[in-house]
Image (cartoon, rainbow, N blue to C red):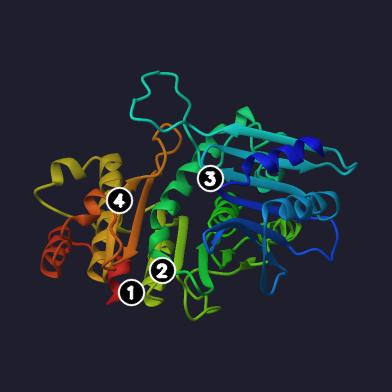
C-alpha cells in the first residue's frame, strides 16, 4: 500500500487527467468511481463521481482527504485503478489475496525537437503495460498488461479503431445519455473497446447495444459485460434490416456486415439522423452482378478485376449517398492491407458548423445529378440508394 500511496501523492496535481476505480469487490460499492481535478474558487480540488448503475453522485475532496479515501477504496471496494496525467499512465491491480501491484509508465515527451529514431515506439491509446480488463479476458493482454505476441495484430487494430472514434468525439453531445448501435458485433473486441474508451476514459454517458445473429456469441458477450461491470453494454440477437429496439441512435457502427447488410445499417443510421457512422463494408457482391460499361469492358472482362472494381464503386457510391443526406464523409484505410484486404472504412459525421474532419471530408461532395449520371453509366442500382429513396 505504501507504493500505492506514493503514486497518489505523485499524480494528484494539476497535470492529472483522470483516475478510474473499477472491478467492485462487494455489492455495496459503487460500480465505478471516476476522479478528475476541479478548480474551486481558484483552489485545486478533486471531484469523485460515483456511479451506482442508475445515477451518479459527486463528492469534492482535498488532496489529503482523497488519498485516504482512495486507499480505502483499493483495500475494500475495487480491484483496479487506472490513471492518466500529462506525464504518465498508471495502473493498480489488487489480487484475490490482497496483493497490490503498481505499474506506471512515462508518456512520450512533447517538445519542439522531432524524434529522429527509426525505432521509436508508437504511442497507442490503450498502452501496452497498462492492463485493460476486457483485453486480458479476451486473451489479447496478460494480467500484467503485456500484449500476447500472437494477438498483436488485434491489439493494433483495436487501437487504430479507437483513433477513428477519438476523431468523432467532438460530434457527440454531452449532458445526456447517448445511444450507440454496433450492427454485426461478432465477438465484440471493438465493441468492448468503444465502451471502455468512450465511457470509462472519455466520460460519456453512453449505452451500447451490440447486435448479431449468433445467439451463442451474444450470450458470451453479455456474460463478459456483466463480469466487467459494464452496466450499459447489452448484446442482442437480431437482424440489421428489421431491428426496431430504439427510436434514436447517436452513433452507428457496422464492421464487416456482409454485402447489402451494410446498406441496411447505413440506411437505418440516416433514418435515425445519427451524429456519426463508422462502417467497414465486407463482401460487396451486389454491383458485381449489375455493372456494365462498354468503355470499361476491356477491364471488366477479367473476373477478379471486375470484382475489385465493383467493391470500390459500391463503397464510393455509399459515401456519396451519405453526403447527399447531410454527412461529411471520409473513405479511410482501416488497417494495413497485409492484415486483411477488407480494410476500407467509411466514416461519416453529420454536418455541424463546429465540427470539421480533416482533408477530404472538407471537399465538396458530388451533386445529385452527378451521382445519377455515374450510376446510369455503370448500369447499377445500389441497395442503399433504393432504401434512402
Q: Secondary structure at mark 2?
A: helix
Q: Residues within 10 Å of mark 4 (few under 14, many from 20)?
A: some
Q: Residues within 10 Å of mark 3 (few under 14, many from 20)?
A: few
Q: Which residue is mark 3?
A: 15
Kindly indicate whether the residue at mark 4 contacts the one at mark 3 (C-beta within 8 angstroms): no
Where in the figure is residue 185, as x and y percent of width and height? Answer: 56, 58
Kindly indicate whether the residue at mark 4 contacts the one at mark 1 (C-beta within 8 angstroms): no
Q: Residue at x 71, y 60 (%)?
A: 32
The foreground one among 210 and 290 is: 210
First of labels 2, 1 by sequence position:
2
First of labels 3, 2 by sequence position:
3
Where in the figure is residue 284, as x and y percent of width and height? Answer: 36, 54
Q: Residues within 10 Å of mark 1 (few under 14, many from 20)?
A: few
Q: Which residue is mark 2?
A: 264
Looking at the image, residue 185 sits to the left or right of residue 34; the answer is left
Q: Quadrant of residue 53?
A: bottom right
Kindly indicate whether the residue at mark 1 contacts the one at mark 2 (C-beta within 8 angstroms): yes
Q: CA distance from mark 2 to mark 1?
A: 8 Å
Give the position of the N terminus as an image quadrant.
Answer: top right
- Residue 91 shows which numbered tag? none
Q: Which residue is mark 4?
A: 331
Q: Residue at x 41, y 73 (%)?
A: 268
Q: Which residue is mark 1?
A: 387
First of labels 1, 4 by sequence position:
4
Q: Is residue 222 visible?
A: yes
Q: Secondary structure at mark 3?
A: loop
Q: Nearer the viewer, mark 3 or mark 2?
A: 3
Q: Secondary structure at mark 1?
A: helix
Q: Residue furthest bottom?
A: 247
Amino acid at each position: 500500500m505504501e507504493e500505492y500511496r506514493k503514486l497518489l501523492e505523485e499524480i494528484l496535481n494539476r497535470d492529472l487527467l483522470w483516475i478510474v476505480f473499477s472491478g467492485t469487490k462487494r455489492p455495496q460499492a459503487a460500480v465505478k468511481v471516476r476522479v478528475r481535478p476541479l478548480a474551486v474558487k481558484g483552489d485545486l480540488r478533486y471531484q469523485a463521481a460515483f456511479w451506482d448503475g442508475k445515477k451518479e453522485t459527486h463528492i469534492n475532496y482535498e488532496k489529503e482527504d482523497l488519498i485516504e479515501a482512495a486507499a480505502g477504496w483499493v483495500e475494500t471496494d475495487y480491484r483496479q485503478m487506472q490513471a492518466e496525467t500529462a506525464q504518465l499512465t498508471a495502473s493498480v491491480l489488487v489480487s484475490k489475496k490482497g496483493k497490490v501491484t503498481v505499474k506506471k509508465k512515462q508518456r512520450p515527451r512533447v517538445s519542439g525537437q522531432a524524434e529522429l529514431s527509426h525505432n521509436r515506439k508508437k504511442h497507442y491509446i490503450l498502452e501496452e503495460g497498462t492492463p485493460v480488463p476486457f483485453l486480458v479476458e479476451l486473451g489479447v493482454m496478460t494480467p500484467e498488461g503485456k500484449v500476447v505476441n500472437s494477438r498483436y495484430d488485434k491489439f493494433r487494430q483495436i487501437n487504430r479503431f479507437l483513433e477513428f472514434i477519438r476523431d468523432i468525439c467532438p460530434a457527440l453531445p454531452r449532458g445526456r445519455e447517448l445511444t450507440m448501435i454496433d450492427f454485426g458485433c461478432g465477438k465484440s473486441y471493438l465493441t468492448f473497446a468503444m465502451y471502455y474508451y468512450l465511457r470509462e476514459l472519455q466520460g460519456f454517458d453512453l449505452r451500447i447495444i451490440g447486435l448479431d445473429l449468433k445467439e451463442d456469441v451474444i450470450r458470451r458477450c453479455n456474460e463478459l459485460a456483466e463480469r466487467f461491470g459494464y452496466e450499459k453494454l447489452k448484446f442482442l440477437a437480431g437482424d440489421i434490416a428489421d431491428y426496431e429496439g430504439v427510436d434514436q441512435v447517436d452513433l452507428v457502427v457496422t464492421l464487416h456486415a456482409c454485402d447489402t447488410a451494410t446498406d441496411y445499417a447505413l440506411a437505418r443510421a440516416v433514418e435515425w439522423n445519427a451524429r456519426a457512422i463508422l462502417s467497414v463494408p465486407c463482401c460487396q457482391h451486389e454491383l458485381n452482378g449489375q455493372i456494365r460499361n462498354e468503355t470499361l469492358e476491356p477491364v471488366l472482362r477479367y473476373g477478379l478485376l471486375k470484382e475489385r472494381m465493383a467493391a470500390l464503386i459500391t463503397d464510393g457510391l455509399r459515401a456519396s449517398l451519405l453526403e447527399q443526406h447531410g454527412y461529411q464523409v471520409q473513405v479511410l484505410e482501416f488497417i494495413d492491407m497485409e492484415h486483411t484486404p477488407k480494410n476500407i472504412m467509411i466514416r461519416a459525421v453529420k454536418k455541424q458548423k463546429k465540427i470539421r474532419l480533416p482533408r477530404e471530408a472538407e471537399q465538396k461532395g458530388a451533386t445529385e445529378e452527378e451521382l445519377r449520371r455515374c450510376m446510369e453509366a455503370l448500369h447499377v442500382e445500389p441497395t442503399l440508394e433504393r432504401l434512402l429513396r
